[in-house]
Image: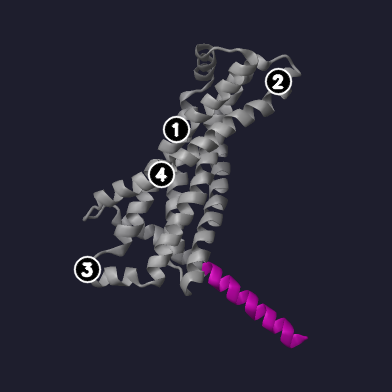
């Protein structure tokens, strides 16, 4: 029994050590990004290419998701408001919910699944096939070309996708409200813009920047540190999605607390 207890303690200790080592490696990986992002050479063409892949190629999925979110949320909100005879508040309620929380969160989660897994799998496959080592031999900085460009692209494009998602979701909500309450487009969007404040829009964009940075950085880190052949590539892609989503929820919770401080003032 004593031997088994000692073995368990040893295994637990090794897991703790591995966790903190992984945490330190991740911190150094992030710190290296800020050290190299402002240092030439600047890979502008690769950044633009990654922006296209992350932004334009995600539009079909983002459009469908945002449109459905607008319709579903409107349908779910109508019965509760109708109990109080307040269905006229639907546009205001939908606008606040979508701009403040649903638009950024839904976009970030979709991007984490599509973009984050793609980045993790792509860089992971390059790692296990020694393409990254070949780049180092050819005097190319693989970190700057692979990591910095992708993190910049996700940081820049996620806020753009969020604003697009907000618009598509509001259009879906308008179609639903127009079909049921016969509200005109001018009346609907007048209520929308009267309910949304500058703080709502600004905070949505700022936290979208953090969401994009998180998705890009986690995907790159998991891919860059993958191993064990094709199995490692699959694990890197899966871990990129899971960790990104977990961190996005943490960031959403923290941002909500910070923004509420400004609302109270």
Quadrant into which the N terminus falls: bottom right
- Which range is magenta? 1-20
Q: Position of residue 36 (x, y in %)?
A: 29, 57
Residue at 67% across, 16% down: 87
Quarter residue 93 falls in: top right
From the image, give the main secondary structure of the stretch colored magenta.
helix
The residue pinned by badge 3 equals 139
Regarding residue 258, the answer to whether it shows in the image is: no
Q: Position of residue 239 (x, y in %)?
A: 53, 60
The residue pinned by badge 4 equals 57
Spatial separation of the CA atoms under disc 2 and disc 3: 63 Å
The residue pinned by badge 2 equals 81
Residue at 43% across, 41% down: 158
Residue at 48% across, 46% down: 111
Q: Residues within 10 Å of mark 4 (few under 14, many from 20)?
A: few
Looking at marks 3 and 4 on the same chain, the residue that comes earlier in the sequence is marked by: 4
Spatial separation of the CA atoms under disc 3 and disc 4: 31 Å
Q: Secondary structure at mark 4?
A: helix
Q: Residue furthest bottom?
A: 3
Q: Nearer the viewer, residue 92 or 20?
A: 92
Spatial separation of the CA atoms under disc 4 and disc 1: 14 Å
Looking at marks 4 and 2 on the same chain, the residue that comes earlier in the sequence is marked by: 4
Looking at marks 2 and 3 on the same chain, the residue that comes earlier in the sequence is marked by: 2
The residue pinned by badge 1 equals 164
| Residue depth check, mark 4 versus mark 2: number of the one nearer the observer | 4
Q: Secondary structure at mark 1?
A: helix
| Residue depth check, mark 1 versus mark 3: number of the one nearer the observer | 1
Residue 208 versus residue 13 in the image, above or below: above
Contact, CB < 8 Å: mark 2 with mark 1? Answer: no
């Amino acid at each position: 029994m004593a031997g088994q207890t000692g073995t368990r303690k040893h295994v637990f200790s090794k897991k703790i050590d591995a966790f903190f080592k992984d945490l330190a490696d991740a911190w150094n990986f992030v710190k290296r990004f800020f050290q190299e992002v402002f240092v030439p050479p600047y890979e502008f063409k690769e950044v633009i290419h990654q922006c296209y892949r992350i932004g334009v190629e995600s539009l079909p999925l983002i459009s469908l998701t945002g449109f459905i979110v607008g319709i579903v949320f409107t349908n779910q909100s109508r019965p509760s408001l109708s109990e109080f005879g307040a269905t006229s508040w639907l546009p205001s309620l939908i606008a606040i919910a979508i701009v403040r929380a649903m638009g950024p969160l839904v976009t970030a989660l979709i991007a984490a699944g599509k973009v984050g897994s793609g980045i993790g799998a792509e860089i992971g496959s390059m790692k296990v096939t020694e393409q990254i080592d070949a780049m180092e031999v050819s005097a190319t900085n693989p970190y700057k070309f692979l990591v910095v460009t992708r993190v910049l692209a996700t940081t820049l494009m996620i806020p753009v996708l969020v604003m697009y998602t907000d618009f598509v979701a509001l259009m879906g909500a308008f179609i639903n409200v127009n079909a049921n309450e016969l509200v005109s487009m001018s009346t609907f969007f007048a209520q929308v813009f009267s309910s949304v404040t500058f703080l709502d829009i600004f905070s949505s964009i700022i936290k979208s920047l953090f969401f994009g940075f998180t998705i890009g950085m986690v995907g790159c880190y998991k891919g860059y540190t993958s191993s064990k052949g094709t199995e490692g590539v699959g694990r890197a892609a899966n871990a990129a999605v899971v960790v990104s989503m977990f961190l996005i929820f943490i960031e959403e919770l923290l941002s909500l607390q910070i923004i509420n401080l400004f609302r109270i003032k």
